Amino acid sequence: MPKVVDKEQKRIDIARKTMPLLAKYGFENTPIRRITAEVGMGKGTFYDYFTSKEDILNEIVRLVFTDWIEWVIRKMGNIDDPLEKLFILVRDGSTLDATFEQNMIIYVDLWRWSVSHKGSNEFIPKFRSYLENGRNSVIDLIKEAQSKGLVKKEIDAAAIASALIAFIDGMCLHSLILKPEFDVERVCRSLFESILKGIRPT
């Protein structure tokens, strides 16, 4: 009886094996032949799972964002307080272990690729949608805090969310470059306490 292959899982497996290559060489310097050699498959088999090199990039982008979101959600656990959730988002979202260090390197490369307009009309909107989804999740947390009277009603939730997401991006970059001296916990706590002073009801 022939072996049944879960095509979606196989796509994920191939994409995950490709991620270290992108972290090391960058997307533009990772040809399909290098991917197939790393994964141990022929070029023809690669096209059974992906329509193009950019198709595998789309899968990798999805994994980078999904991994990050799942990591933060696990850290939040069963916490109900939206402000505590926001702090965990900022602190743990800025903390890089070995996996997230690799993912951050890929993320930076994808930013560069998008900003230089080398990405296609298919990739750039997908990348933007993941960024927007992340920002919208933060907006929801801030609005939840507003509804519970923990944050001033007049605060612009979208503006604060954008600032926090930008802060997380910057923290991750600083962690990459300045580790191990860079104290993520101290910087995040200091910033978050400062923000709370401005957005809490008086």
Image (cartoon, rainbow, N blue to C red):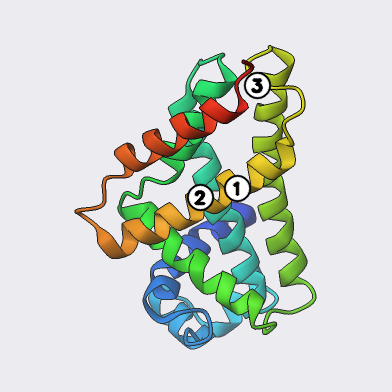
Number of marks drawn: 3
Assign a secondary structure to mark 2.
helix
Assign a secondary structure to mark 1.
helix
Among the two numbered marks 2 and 3 on one chain, the one whose residue lies closer to the N terminus: 3
Q: Which residue is mark 1?
A: 163
Q: Which residue is mark 2?
A: 167
Q: Is residue 14 above or below residue 99?
A: below
Marks 1/2 in contact by CB < 8 Å: the verdict is yes
In which quadrant will I find the C terminus? top right
The answer to which image quadrant residue 110 occupies is bottom right
Q: Separation of disc 1 and disc 3 at Cα?
A: 16 Å
Of residues 90 and 33, the one drawn nearer to the viewer in this rendering: 90
Instruction: Return the x and y of residue 27 as percentages of the image width and height.
Output: 52, 79
Q: What residue type is disc 1 on?
A: Ala
Instruction: Return the x and y of residue 140 as percentages of the image width and height.
Output: 71, 30
**Badge 3: residue crowd in 10 Å (few <14, some 14–19, many ≥20):** many
Q: Separation of disc 2 and disc 3 at Cα?
A: 19 Å
Assign a secondary structure to mark 3.
loop
Q: Is residue 88 visible?
A: no
Of residues 2 and 164, the one drawn nearer to the viewer in this rendering: 164
Q: Separation of disc 1 and disc 2 at Cα?
A: 6 Å
Q: Residue furthest right?
A: 121
- Kindly report which numbered mark, 2 or 3, lies closer to the viewer in this rendering: 3
Query: Measuring 33% from the left and 61% from the top, which residue is drawn there?
Result: 176
Among the two numbered marks 1 and 3 on one chain, the one whose residue lies closer to the N terminus: 3
Q: Which residue is mark 3?
A: 151
Q: Is residue 185 above or below residue 146?
A: below
